[in-house]
Image (spheres, rainbow, N blue to C red):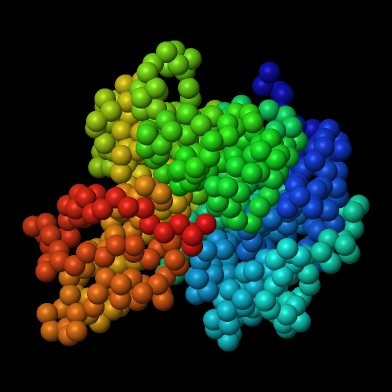
Amino acid sequence: MDQLKPSSANLCPQTPLDFLDRAAIVYGDCPSIIYNSTTTYTWSQTHRRCLQLASSISTLVKKSQVVSVVSPNTPAMYELHFAVPMSGAVLNNINTRLDAHTVSVLLQHSESKLVFVDCLSLNLVLQALSLFPSHIPTPPLVLIKDHHQPSSTSSTVDSIADTYDNMVAKGDPGFVWVRPASEWDPMVLNYTSGTTSAPKGAVHCHRALFNVSLVSIIDWSVPKNCVYLWTLPMFHANGWCFPWAMAAVGGTNICLRKFNGPIIYDLIQKHRVTHMCAAPVVLNMLVNHPRTDPLPNPVCILTAGAPPPSSLLLRAESLGFVVSHGYGLTETAGVVVSCAWKPEWNKFPVTEKARLKARQGVRTVGMTDVDVVDPDSGMSVKRNGSDVGEIVMRGGCVMLGYLKDPETTSETLKQNGWFYTGDVGVMHPDGYLEIKDRSKDVIISGGENLSSVEVESVLYTNAAVNEAAVVAKPDEFWGETPCAFVSLKADVRPRPTEKEIIEFCRGKLPNFMVPKTVVFKDELPKTSTGKIQKSMLREIAKNIGTTSTTRSSRL
């Protein structure tokens, strides 16, 4: 046995890009992408288009250089998940909801060499490029046109090097795509949040994305030829790796650039959608939409991003949705913990079933271990459902590290062999994980993570503000929204109103990070060491109204 060694025949690097080659053969005539009822591609067409696009990209960038994409869930966004890494470049998706300053910071930090930009985000990216220091060259742009959504800016802008359609048309359909030399080669770069000070770019290799993609369809029991509705943004951790997973099962991707309750129900009815991923905010949108028609078929929903209330899960399933609950981070590329359902639980009352399903669950088969540990001793907490600790994990889905940030990488990927998530949870006696809180005061609003520290830093730039603290306020629609507690300087006249503080933040932050509530205090509560007691403020925030915030500008 000892004489048998690995050879070139069994050392082929694992990559999810291989799924597309296979899909072109097995599912060649099956629909791959449907968009606006006017655009439909088959898997053989998608394969050819991605090869042509990869061919064109390879003439503009070198291997391992970063190519950024700013786009909603359009066919181009889907194709770029294959074409960019097939060219040998590293894919970097940027949140379309960010402001120009943040986009500029991310493009500079990633040293992006080429930017694909959707027509409706062109002005945003042009403004971001205008903020580049004079000594840093700006990357050329490739404009993604959409005849349903004409651009408000002329395509003759100097920064635009080409159009997406032209890049596809002039590419070589016989292009031999660039396979990774090692499965540890970087494939994607995803930023954990829209930070303006210290961006954290999680880098994932081909092996990890191969792992997450296959594990996701196994864990969720996704069948061949499913119909998948893209309500989860692909710019959010690569849509939890489902662009590649759909190629593995020959699924049909229903693409759309924006949605609401009526649009989702219409597409479910029209295309007989079988699967979709969604943050709890989308679940809330669906259960609160007035409708009487039953679903034409059961729709499987995978929800993650924030712990969903059990009552929300109960209402969703009463409408015909089959909800699965999971947990993951940008650093794990997708869902790596899921509430694996046990058949005996089906005998329980519906309220008990909803309570069990609200837990995050157990590790997927792609992870080696998940635990909850005491942050001081590093020892596992008792599995009693009440002792809290930090959630840690290890396995093939964990990132390589943060780009250009060895210090934070070493703090997160510790020498003891664990990835420290920064999330706080408990372990139940049956081995199921449940999140209870978040360290670092991260707020999850509509599935998007935002740092309270960043919002506080903006509040402190207001000349009238003496102290500021931002905590999560429960919200029926968004799950959580930022609530700011502020004390004002004694000599300030006139005193700013809540509306004025919110408008001040709106001019300096992405919309989803702007506080939706501002509470004025003479002095913020503090510990004996002078630290603001955020735990006390969270309790106050829970009791400040229950009306859901405005929905229109967040999706």
Nearer to the camera, 334 or 421 = 334
Q: Classify 299 as above or below 468.
A: above
- The quadrant of the picture occupied by the N terminus is top right
Q: Does residue 1 appear left or right of residue 479 in this picture?
A: right
Residue furthest to the left in view is 528
Q: Vertically, is 421 above or below 313? A: below
Q: Residue at x 62, y 35 (%)?
A: 275
Residue at 72% x, 70% y: name it: 150
Instruction: Using the rendered view, name the quadrant where residue 310 is placed.
Output: top left
Q: Is residue 342 visible from the viewing direction of this image?
A: yes
Pinpoint residue 515: horizontal percent, then vertical percent: 34, 64
- Residue at 51% from the left image edge and 31% from the top image edge: 319
Examine the rendering and report whether any part of residue 324 can be seen: no
Residue 24 locus on image (x, y percent): 84, 40
Q: Position of residue 379 (x, y in %)?
A: 29, 33
- Across and down, in percent, residue 425 comes to 32, 37
Horizontally, residue 339 falls left or right of residue 463, namely right
- Relative vertical location of residue 136 with respect to residue 295 in this rendering, above or below: below
Query: As rendered, which of 482 and 283 lies closer to the eye?
Result: 283
Q: Camera-side residue: 227 or 68?
A: 227
* Pick the front one: 51 or 297: 297
Residue at the (79%, 57%) spot, across then down: 54
